[in-house]
Image (spheres, rainbow, N blue to C red):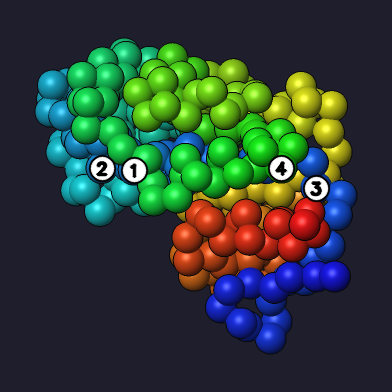
Amino acid sequence: MNYRSTDDNDDALLTDARKIKAVIFDLDGTLVDTVPLHVTSWIETCKRLGFPIPTMEYVRTLMGLRALDIARRLCGDIIAEKALEIKNEVYLSLLDRARTIDGATELLSTLKDRGFIIGIVTSSSRRVAIKVLEVTGLRKYVDALVAGDDVNRGKPDPEPLLRILNSLGLDVHEVVVVGDSRYDVEMALNAGVSTVFFLGKHEDPRVISIKGLLDVARYLGQFLV
């Protein structure tokens, strides 16, 4: 039995889910609604350091890249690490506003109950990612985490995903990836993952477009009832 993308595109990817053991998620914008907080934090960082203030739209295009790589683009290589420290402090001060994406808690709980391993691959630093998971109550569902400062090359390079698979002892064909940015998709496809769920409309025929997180449980659940 197979499943297809929610957009009913005739060219949509068809994938057998019986071998799937784990679901690997992006964090910001996928499980937690924190992208606006990141954008605000980067803009404030530029202000404090006296750099030209980028537009919100431009900063949003950088979301999904490793945090240090964003700092380099906005503030230059020389001051990037200092910029990231400032950004993280600003961001942590805003975390009382952090909320989960609709369906996130229910999805993770359902997947855990069905025996799936849950992994997080995020471009945020480990300290920040763990704090977000704690504030939103999602940490108890997570079996493994790879953060931006755990790797030498961030998304869209496959290194973060391959690192978490190695830590879990899994093959690329035993996982699906769920994300909301093109960097998530490119990382997964570059690693050789067969199935990528994308929150929103995606034109790549290798990617399954979904309207909401609970679609992931519905698809995988077809083979577990």
The mark closer to the camera, 4 or 3, is 4
Residue at disc 4, secondary structure = loop
User: Closer to the N terminus: mark 3 or mark 2?
Assistant: 3
User: Closer to the N terminus: mark 3 or mark 1?
Assistant: 3
Question: Badge 1 is on which residue?
Answer: 33
Question: Badge 3 is on which residue?
Answer: 20
Mark 2 and mark 4: Cα distance apart in space:
32 Å
Mark 1 and mark 2: Cα distance apart in space:
8 Å
Badge number at residue 87: none
The answer, for residue 4, to whether it is visible in the render is: yes
Q: Residue at x 29, y 28 (%)?
A: 75
Q: Given the image, on which type of amino acid does mark 4 rest?
A: Arg
Mark 4 and mark 3: Cα distance apart in space:
12 Å
Location of residue 91 by image quarter = top left
Question: Badge 4 is on which residue?
Answer: 114
Q: Given the image, on which type of amino acid does mark 2 rest?
A: Pro
